[in-house]
Each structure stands twice: as C-alpha cells, then as structure tokens.
Amino acid sequence: MVAYPGAGSVGLYGGLAYLYARRAVVRDPAKAAATRALVGAFVRAYQWANTHPEDWARRYYVDNQKVSADDAKRIVDSLGTYVFPHLDQQLVDRQQATIDAIAKAGELPKKVQASNGFDLRFDAAITQAVTESGASFEPKAR
C-alpha cells in the first residue's frame, strides 16, 4: 500500500488523512498520472471547504448527512482548517513514531516500517495543488 498525505486539520482533530493506492497503480505511468490528478483534486476540494465553510456545512452535513444546521456548524468549526503537509521524510518519521508507540504497547504482530507505505514522488503533486489553490502546507500561527 502506498500512502499520500491528505488533509490534516488545525482544530480539535489534528490528525492526518491519507490517500492510498496499490503499488501496481503507482508503478503504471498512466495510472500514476491519474493518481497525481486525484491528489490535486483532493487538495482543491478540501481547500474549497476551507474557504466556503457555510456551503460545506450545508451541502455535506445538512443535505447529505441529515444533521441539523447548528450541529453542522459545530462540526465544521471543530475540524478547523485543513492543511496539506509535504510528503517527505519528516512525515514518514511522524508516522513511524506512531507505529513504534503502537508496537511498544504490544499491539502489532510484526515490525512495520512506515517508509514502506509512502511514495515521496507524489509530493510534487501536493506542492503544485497547494500552491495553485492558496492552501497551506502547515498550520498558521494562532
């Protein structure tokens, strides 16, 4: 499995989301190009949510998920601003630290290497989409 950083948010939930693809997909030039396009669309979509929180709350949470408008606003406010970290060694190290903590607790049946799950070549697609959309790579100072 190959992972790409998705939207981490600055708010109550500070975690990362990932886009995954099989290795066979990213090894095929045409499928890898389609994956790069998907990464760009992912960044642009979440950046739209950053800049249109009321529309996002209404269209997704109220219209699609059928929650009240007040609850939708609370949910969107709690998520904060989506950011899109670089797909680099620092991100891999962050994931490895999480894996190591889970392993230390005895919850993994075998050794897991985070570096086996990332394809750093896709950072260029993230960088381009973030730059073109006006999104951010990291949280803004509060």
Image (cartoon, rainbow, N blue to C red):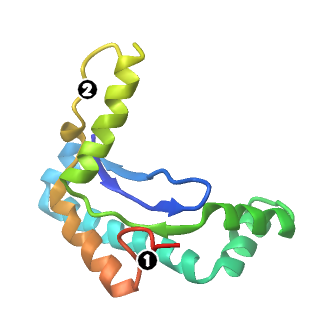
Instruction: Give, as a three-letter code, the residue at label 2.
Output: Val
Q: Is residue 111 above or below residue 47?
A: above
Q: Is residue 18 above or below residue 45?
A: above
Instruction: Give, as a three-letter code, the residue at label 1.
Output: Arg
Q: Residue most toward the front?
A: 142
Label 1 crowd (10 A; few <14 / some 14-19 / many >=20) = some
Residue 111 - label: none
Horizontal side of residue 37 vs 75, given as left or right:
left
| Along the line of sight, the residue nearer the viewer: 72 or 93 | 93
Q: Is residue 20 above or below residue 98?
A: below
Q: Is residue 3 above or below residue 58?
A: above
- Residue in the picture at 24% in, 46% down: 92
In space, the residues marked 2 and 1 are separated at their CA atoms by: 32 Å
- Residue in the picture at 38% in, 66% down: 84
Dividing the picture into quadrants, the one containing residue 1 is top left
Horizontal side of residue 69 vs 49, given as left or right:
right
Horizontal side of residue 74 vs 29, given as left or right:
right
Q: Which residue is mark 2?
A: 112
Dividing the picture into quadrants, the one containing residue 40 is bottom left
Label 2 crowd (10 A; few <14 / some 14-19 / many >=20) = few
Give coordinates of residue 90: x percent, y percent.
23, 52
State the SS at label 1. helix
Give coordinates of residue 120: x percent, y percent.
17, 56
Nearer the viewer's eye, disc 2 or disc 1? 2
Q: Which residue is mark 1?
A: 44
The mark that comes first in sequence, 2 or 1, is: 1
- Residue in the picture at 28% in, 62% down: 35
